Image: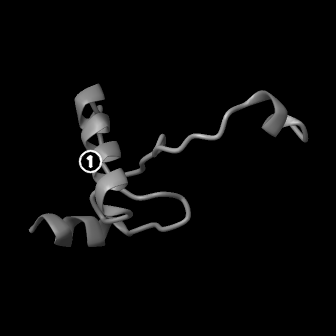
Amino acid sequence: MRQRRDWFEKFDRVYLALWWISAGHIPTIDEAKLRLASLEEKGPTPFAFTFKTTFTPEQALEAIA
């Protein structure tokens, strides 16, 4: 793992997005693409965020209301 920079290219684009889902919901590929695009365009929000900048489920619900 120490030489990972020699083997892997650095991504210039967002490749990981986190978001809260309801119990039992299975996210779709299209939903994931939408979240990735939102994160890349707007940065971390309750709609899509990263491990570095997180939001609570309550914040996510407030954002949609």
Closer-to-camera residue (12/2) = 12
Q: Residue at x 30, y 45 (%)?
A: 37
What's under tag 1, amino acid-wise? Ser
**In the picture shown, does residue 41 fall above or below 9?**
below
Q: What element carries label 1?
A: loop
Q: Residue at x 18, y 72 (%)?
A: 62
Instruction: Report crowding for label 1: few under 14, some 14 to 19, many 20 or more residues within 10 A (C-alpha).
Output: few
Residue closest to the far left = 65
Can you say which quadrant of the picture contains the C terminus? bottom left
Q: Is residue 49 left or right of residue 2?
A: left
Q: How many marks?
A: 1
**In the picture shown, does residue 25 fall above or below 51?**
above
Residue closest to the far right = 2
Residue designated by label 1: 22
Rendered image quadrant of residue 6: top right
Q: Where is residue 41 in the image (x, y as percent from the top left)?
A: 30, 55
**In the picture shown, does residue 61 fall above or below 19?**
below
Q: Residue at x 28, y 52 (%)?
A: 38
Rendered image quadrant of residue 9: top right
Q: Position of residue 13 (x, y in %)?
A: 47, 43
Closer-to-camera residue (25/5) = 5
Q: Where is residue 53 in the image (x, y as percent from the top left)?
A: 48, 68
Can you say which quadrant of the picture contains the N terminus? top right
Q: Which residue is drawn at 20% across and 66% down?
A: 61
